[in-house]
């Protein structure tokens, strides 16, 4: 699920906010061990993957997904 404005406000809180988001995602997806050690960038890509799985008929192909996956800050 994409982040709502309230969830996005966690990012402005630095490490504390990121930890809060990862805790919520870990509980929601039952993957606490998977997300707890992710960096912000890794976590963003993890959430992006979750969103993609919710879209059955994406308006773009796998080439776009792969390009986004290779993106670095």
Image: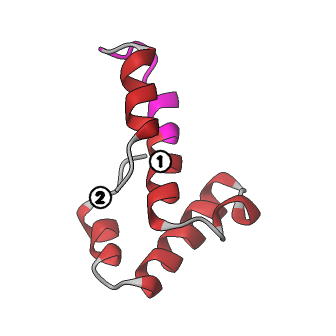
Label 1 crowd bin: few (<14), some (14–19), many (20+), radius 10 Å? some
Q: Nearer the viewer, residue 18 or 29?
A: 18
Residues shaded magenta: 49-59
Q: Judge whether residue 54 can be spotted in this image.
A: no
Rendered location of residue 63, percent (x, y): 41, 17
Q: Judge whether residue 40 can be spotted in this image.
A: yes
CA–CA distance between discs 2 and 1?
A: 16 Å
Q: Nearer the viewer, residue 44 or 67?
A: 67
Rendered location of residue 49, percent (x, y): 51, 38
Tell me the SS state at disc 1: helix
Q: Is residue 54 magenta?
A: yes
Residue in the picture at 24% in, 64% down: 5
State if disc 1 and disc 2 touch (CB < 8 Å).
no
Label 2 crowd bin: few (<14), some (14–19), many (20+), radius 10 Å? few
Which of the two labelled residues, at mark 2 and mark 1, occupies the earlier sequence position?
A: 2
Label 2 sits on residue: 4
Q: Which quadrant of the figure has residue 64? A: top left
Which mark is on residue 45? 1
* 59 versus 67 height, above or below: above
Q: Which quadrant of the figure has residue 70? A: top left
Q: Is residue 72 left or right of residue 34?
A: left
Q: Nearer the viewer, mark 2 or mark 1?
A: 1
Q: Is residue 4 left or right of residue 16?
A: left
* 29 versus 10 height, above or below: above
Rendered location of residue 32, percent (x, y): 71, 65
Rendered location of residue 50, percent (x, y): 52, 40
Residue in the picture at 34% in, 56% down: 73
Residue in the picture at 44% in, 42% down: 48
* 23 versus 45 height, above or below: below
């Amino acid at each position: 699920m994409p982040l709502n404005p309230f969830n996005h406000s966690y990012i402005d809180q630095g490490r504390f906010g990121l930890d809060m988001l990862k805790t919520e995602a870990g509980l929601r997806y039952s993957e606490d061990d998977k997300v707890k050690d992710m960096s912000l960038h890794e976590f963003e890509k993890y959430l992006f993957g979750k969103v993609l799985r919710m879209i059955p008929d994406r308006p773009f192909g796998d080439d776009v997904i792969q390009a986004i996956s290779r993106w670095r800050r």
